[in-house]
Image (cartoon, grey):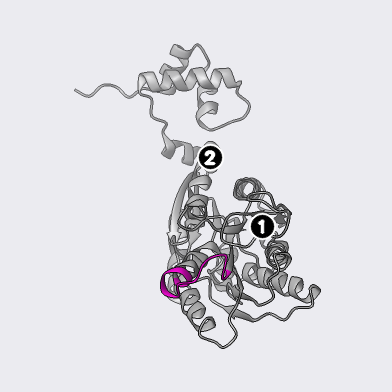
Amino acid sequence: MAADRVTTYDVAKAAGVSQPTVSRVFSRSTSVDPAKVERVRAVARELGYIPNLVARSLNSGHSFRIGIVLAYLKNGFFGEALQDFSKALNKQGYSVTVYFAGNSSDDIDGIIDDLLADQVDGIVLASISLSNALVTRVRKSGIPCVLFNRGQSDPDVSMVTASNFMGGKQATEFLIKAGHMRIAHLAGWRKALNGVDRRDGFLAAMEEAGLEPLACIDCHFRRTVAMVETRKLFHQKVVPDALFVANDHMAFGVLEVLREELGLRVPQDVSVIGYDDAPMADWKTFDLTTVRQPLPQMIDATATMLLSEIADPSRASEKIEIPGELIVRGSARMPAGVTRMTAKP
C-alpha cells in the first residue's frame, strides 16, 4: 500500500509553524520571515512534500505559468536570456513555457491558440524577428504582455530594451576614433525597431564625423545573410576597413568569412564590432569586441513589469531603455589610449 501523501499540516507540525505559514511559503509570499522560509523548505524536502500546484491554481484563479515566445534559439543571446528568465520567474512562483513562432498567419494563429489553451498568466515576446501582427494578436487576447529586447512604436505596449541607438553610435565612434574611414554596417531588420535604432546610431556617428557609410545592408539578423553580404562587400573595388554588425550571431559568421574564406587578418586588415555580447563572444576563437546588452537588468525589469501587469491589468504601459556597455576585445583596432574591456558609455 502506498504511503500517505505528505500535507502542509505535516510540514507545519514538523517545522513548528502554522499551516497558513506553510501555504504562504509555497505561494512565494514575501510576508514570511526568511528564517521560517528556510526552515519550512528544509522540512518539506526531508518529508518529501510536493506542493499541489493544481489546487493552488484553482484557489487563486491563476495558472502561475508564463509563456515566452521566441522565433528561434540559434542566437546564443536568447538561450542565455531564457535561462535567466526561468530563474527570475521561478523565484516568484511561476513556471515558464517556451513557444516558437514564425511570422506566417498560420504560425501566429497557432501560437495564440496555444497560449489561450494553456491559460498562461502573462507573455514575454522575446525576439526581435517576431512580427507586429503577433504583438497585436496577443494584445487583443487580453493576456498581460511585455516585449523583451524588441521595440515597437505602439504606445499601449510595454517593452524593455537596451539603448540601441546609443549602442550603435558608440560602436561606430569607437571605429572612427581608431582611424577607420571605410566603415560598413551589416544591419538587423528594417521592420524591427531594435535594428533600426542600431542603424540610426551608426548613421548619426558617421554624419557627425563627416563620413559617408561605405554600405548599410539589411541582413534580417540572419547569420547566413550576413555571410553572403560580407562576401559581396569584399569583392568590390573599394572594400571596408571596418564592419559594425547588428548582432553577435551575424558577427560570428562574418568573422568566419573574413578569416577562413578571404584570408584577412582581424583587426589588422579589417575591424569587426558586434552587438549583444553573447557567451561565444568571449571565446578565443572570436575574441569579439561588442556592445553588451545589460541582460540581468533587462530580465529584472521585464519580470517586474509583467508581474505588475498581471496583478493590475489596468496598469498603464511602460517603456524602459537600459544603457549597454562596449566590451573591448581583440576583433577591432584600438583607439589611442584604450585597452581591452575598458570602454564604457
Q: Position of residue 193 (x, y in %)?
A: 65, 70
Write down the region rendered in magenta: 257-270
Residue 120 visible in rendering: no
**Numbered mark located on residue 272 in the image:** none
Q: Position of residue 222 (x, y in %)?
A: 49, 71
Residue in the picture at 43% in, 71% down: 107
Q: Which residue is mark 2?
A: 60
- Crowd band around label 1 with a 10 angstrom C-alpha radius: few (<14), some (14–19), many (20+): many
User: Which amino acid, by three-letter code, is at mark 1?
Assistant: Ala
**Numbered mark located on residue 162 in the image:** 1
Q: Quadrant of the C terminus?
A: bottom right
Magenta stretch holds residue 262: yes
- Crowd band around label 2 with a 10 angstrom C-alpha radius: few (<14), some (14–19), many (20+): few
Above/below status of 190 relative to 72: below
Residue in the picture at 44% in, 51% down: 97
Magenta stretch holds residue 16: no
